[in-house]
Image (spheres, rainbow, N blue to C red):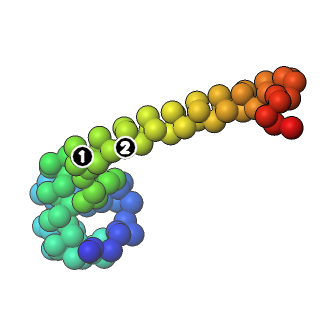
Amino acid sequence: MARPSKKSPEQKLQVVMSVLRGEATATEAGRKAGVSEQSVHNWKRIFLESGRDGLAQGQRRRSSRELELEAENEELKAALGEAHVQLRVFKKGAEYLPPSRTSR
């Protein structure tokens, strides 16, 4: 697995744009930025595929399954929160009821 870049998305964008404008080759831009030529090519590919947001996320692309699971997780968190509130209301209301015969 690749290690995370120490360059910010803005720094990556500047390097990629200089290559795309023809101001420098990938080798020159990489040398100037202190990264490998391969990194510059990867950033360029990612940028062309997904723009500025792609550079911010790097290689991290979320699958449709991952998005489904995140949505389900949010629904479950909301349901759990509602159940917790209902339980607290039930317990609070039970304090005002007289004790039942079976609870003695």
Q: Earlier in the sequence, mark 1 or mark 2?
A: 1
Residue 93, visible in the rendered structure: yes
Label 2 sits on residue = 70
Give 78 or 60, whichever is nearer the viewer: 78
Vertically, is 12 above or below 100? below
* Quadrant showing the N terminus: bottom left
- On the question of residue 28 being in view, the answer is no
Q: Residue at x 14, y 65 (%)?
A: 41
Q: Residue at x 14, y 57 (%)?
A: 45
Question: Which residue, given by chain and number where applicable, does mark 1 sit on?
Answer: 65
| Crowd band around label 2 with a 10 angstrom C-alpha radius: few (<14), some (14–19), many (20+) | few
- What residue type is disc 1 on? Arg
The quarter of the picture where the C terminus appears is: top right
The part of the image, by quadrant, that contains residue 32 is: bottom left
Residue at mark 1 to residue at mark 2: CA–CA distance: 9 Å
Residue at the image position 32 percent from the left and 54 percent from the top: 57
